Image: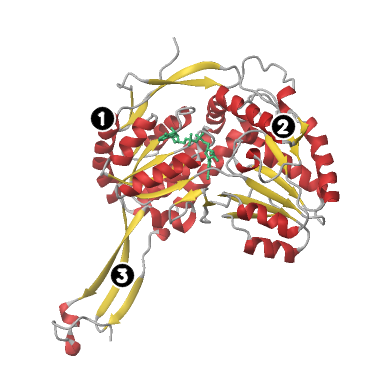
C-alpha cells in the first residue's frame, strides 16, 4: 500500500474526503511513493471558514509576540534541517545541498519578517492642522492564500507565509501536488513554534482547490508563483473576484557576456546557473549571449569542456551536480525541446539525451544539453524549457545583446558579465527585466529587498520580499484626529470643507 498524505487544517493532519488523489513520485526511481489528497470545493471552504476564525486571535497578538513565534519557528526548522532537506530531495529530485539552500532562502524571509514590529509602523504627522494629527495604521487583510510551484517547495511557501503571518493574517497554502510533504511538515513546525491552530493551513489539491480559493469572498489576497499561463489565469480570476493578487510566472533568463569578461569565471558561473537543480529554477540562466564571434567561440569551448564533466546522478548521492527532473512529463518536455532545436537548425554541441547516467533505472533523468547558434525566431528561444538545457545566442555587438532580453516576452532575471563599469551601468539602466545581475548569474535579491519579474514573468502591482510584502499583506487605515480640548480658537465653520491651514 502506498502511504496516503493529508491536509493540515486547524492544527491537525486531516485525511482528504474528496476521493481524488494525485501520485507523488520518487524522481530517483520513478516509483510512486505516496498519494496526495486533492481537495474538493467544500473541503477548501471549510478550511477558509476555520482560518477566518483563527485569524482574529492571531491578529490580537502584538507584533512582538508574533515575531517570537517566528523566531521559534526558525530555530525548529534549523534543528531539522537535515531531515527536511532529505524529504525535500526525495520528492523534488534536487541534491541535498541544494535542498538545504531551498529551506535556508525561505528561512531568510522569516528572519526578515521577525522585524515586523518595525515594519508595521505607519506614517504620522503631528499638527497637520491646528490641533489635528494624522496617522496611518497597517492592519491585516484577514485570510490570505498562497499557491506555489514544485520547484521550491520550502522557499516559496515561506516567501509568502512569512510576511503574511507576521502582519497578522491567517494563511492557506495550496502547495504543488508534486512535492507536498515539506509544506505539511512546516505546518507542524509552525504549530510547535506557538502559532495558534488554524492560522497556517495546508490544503492539497489541483485546479478545483485553487478555483475554490479564488472564488471564496473570505480570501482577501492571493500570492501565486508558477508558470505564466496559470499566473495570468490566477491574477485575472482573483482580481475579478475583488482580491489582491501578486502572481509570478515563467522566465527566460539571459546572460550577456562581453569580450572583456573573464571567460573561465563566466563559464564556471554559467554551468552552475544553467544546470543547477537540473535547470528547474525560475532564475536559471537558459540563454548565454556572447558578444562577438571570438567571445562566442571561446565561451562555447569552455562550456563544452565543463558540461562533459558534469556529474548527474541520484539526488541523495554525494558529489552529484544535479539529479533527476521532477516528473516523467518533464523529461519528455525537455527531450522534445532538444529535438525541436535540432529541427529548427540549432547546433547541438552536447546532447544530454544521449548521456549515460549510472543507476538511472526508471528515474526521471536526462543529461545536460548545450545548444549553439540558436536564433531569436526559434521556439526553443521563445519558450521556457525548464530543464538542463543551456543555449547560446550569438550577438554581433552590445546593442544587439541588450535588445535580446529587453525584447523577450519574459522579464524575470538577466545578467551581464563585463569588467567595464560603464557598460554594466548602461545595461542595468536600459534592460527591460525585473532583476539584474552584474557579474552575478542568479540575482535573486536578499529577503529585505523587494523584487519581482517584469512583463510575462509577473502580474500585479506589488512585488514580494522587503517592504512591498508588508504593503501587500496589510491594508492602510488613515486616521485624522482632533480632541475637543484641542479645538481652541481656530475652530472653523463645520459647513466648510476642512483644509489643513
Ligand atoms: P505550475 O504553474 O504548473 O503550478 C503552480 C501551481 O499552480 C501549483 O500549485 C499547481 O497545482 C497550480 N496549478 C497548476 N495548473 C493549474 C490550473 N489549471 N488552475 C489552477 N491552478 C493550477 O508551475 P510548476 O510547474 O509547479 O512550476 C514551474 C514554473 O514556475 C516555471 O514556469 C517557473 O519559471 C515558475 N517559477 C517562477 C518563479 C518566479 O519567481 N517568477 C519562481 C519559481 C518558479
- Specify the label residue 259 is tagged with: none
Which image quadrant is residue 27 in? top right
Q: Which residue is mark 2?
A: 342
Q: Is residue 252 above or below residue 366?
A: below
Disc 2 residue crowd, few under 14, some 14–19, many 20+, Cα 10 Å: some
Choose the circle earlier in sequence order: 2 or 3: 3
Q: In the image shown, does 410 or 303 lie closer to the viewer?
A: 410
Q: Residue at x 28, y 38 (%)?
A: 48
- Specify the label residue 135 is tagged with: 3
Q: Which residue is mark 1?
A: 42
- In percent of width and height, residue 490 lies at 19, 88
Q: Residue at x 26, y 29 (%)?
A: 42
Q: In the image shown, does 281 or 473 lie closer to the viewer?
A: 281
Residue 441 seen by the camera: no
Say which element carries label 3.
strand
Report the mark closest to the observer, 2 or 3. 2
Kindly check if marks 2 and 1 are in contact, taking CB atoms under 8 A apart as contact. no
Say which element carries label 2.
helix
Amino acid at each position: 500500500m502506498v502511504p496516503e498524505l493529508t491536509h493540515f487544517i486547524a492544527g491537525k493532519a486531516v485525511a482528504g474526503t474528496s476521493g481524488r488523489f494525485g501520485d507523488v513520485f520518487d524522481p530517483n526511481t520513478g516509483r510512486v511513493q505516496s498519494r496526495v489528497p486533492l481537495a474538493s470545493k467544500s473541503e477548501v471552504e471549510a478550511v477558509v471558514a476555520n482560518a477566518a476564525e483563527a485569524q482574529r486571535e492571531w491578529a490580537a497578538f502584538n507584533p512582538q509576540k508574533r515575531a517570537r513565534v517566528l523566531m521559534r519557528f526558525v530555530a525548529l526548522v534549523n534543528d531539522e534541517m537535515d531531515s527536511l532537506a532529505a524529504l525535500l530531495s526525495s520528492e523534488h529530485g534536487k541534491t541535498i545541498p541544494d535542498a538545504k539552500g531551498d529551506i535556508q532562502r525561505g528561512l531568510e524571509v522569516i528572519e526578515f519578517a521577525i522585524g515586523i514590529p518595525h515594519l508595521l509602523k505607519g506614517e504620522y504627522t503631528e499638527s497637520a492642522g491646528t490641533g489635528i494629527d494624522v496617522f496611518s495604521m497597517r492592519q491585516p487583510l484577514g485570510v490570505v492564500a498562497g499557491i506555489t510551484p514544485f520547484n521550491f517547495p520550502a522557499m516559496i511557501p515561506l516567501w509568502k507565509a512569512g510576511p503574511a503571518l507576521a502582519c497578522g493574517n491567517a494563511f492557506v497554502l495550496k502547495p504543488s501536488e508534486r512535492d507536498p510533504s515539506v509544506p505539511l511538515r512546516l505546518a507542524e513546525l509552525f504549530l510547535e513554534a506557538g502559532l495558534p491552530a488554524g492560522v497556517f493551513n495546508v490544503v492539497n489539491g489541483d485546479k478545483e482547490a485553487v478555483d475554490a480559493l479564488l472564488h471564496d469572498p473570505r480570501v482577501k489576497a492571493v500570492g501565486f508563483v508558477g508558470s505564466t499561463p496559470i499566473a495570468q489565469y490566477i491574477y485575472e480570476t482573483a482580481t475579478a473576484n475583488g482580491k489582491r493578487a501578486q502572481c509570478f510566472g515563467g522566465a527566460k533568463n539571459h546572460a550577456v557576456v562581453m569580450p572583456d569578461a573573464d571567460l573561465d569565471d563566466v563559464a564556471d558561473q554559467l554551468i552552475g546557473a544553467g544546470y543547477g537543480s537540473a535547470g528547474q529554477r525560475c532564475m536559471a540562466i537558459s540563454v548565454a549571449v556572447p558578444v562577438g564571434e571570438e567571445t562566442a567561440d571561446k565561451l562555447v569551448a569552455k562550456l563544452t569542456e565543463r558540461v562533459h564533466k558534469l556529474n548527474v546522478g541520484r539526488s541523495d548521492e554525494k558529489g552529484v551536480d544535479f539529479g533527476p527532473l521532477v516528473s516523467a512529463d518533464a523529461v519528455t518536455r525537455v527531450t522534445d525541446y532538444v529535438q525541436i532545436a535540432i529541427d529548427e537548425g540549432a547546433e547541438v554541441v552536447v546532447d544530454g539525451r544521449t548521456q549515460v547516467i549510472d543507476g538511472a533505472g526508471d528515474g526521471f533523468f536526462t543529461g545536460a544539453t548545450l545548444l549553439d547558434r540558436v536564433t531569436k525566431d526559434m521556439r526553443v528561444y521563445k519558450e521556457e524549457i525548464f530543464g538542463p538545457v543551456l543555449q547560446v545566442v550569438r550577438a554581433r555587438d552590445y546593442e544587439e545583446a541588450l535588445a535580446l532580453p529587453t525584447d523577450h516576452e519574459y522579464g524575470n532575471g538577466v545578467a551581464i558579465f563585463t569588467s567595464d563599469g560603464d557598460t554594466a551601468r548602461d545595461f542595468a539602466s536600459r534592460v527591460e527585466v525585473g532583476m539584474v545581475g552584474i557579474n552575478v548569474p542568479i540575482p535573486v535579491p536578499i529577503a529585505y529587498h523587494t523584487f519581482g519579474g517584469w512583463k510575462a514573468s509577473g502580474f500585479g502591482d506589488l512585488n514580494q520580499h522587503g517592504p512591498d510584502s508588508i504593503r501587500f499583506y496589510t491594508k492602510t487605515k488613515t486616521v485624522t484626529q482632533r480632541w475637543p480640548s484641542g479645538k481652541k480658537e481656530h475652530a472653523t465653520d463645520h459647513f466648510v470643507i476642512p483644509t489643513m491651514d
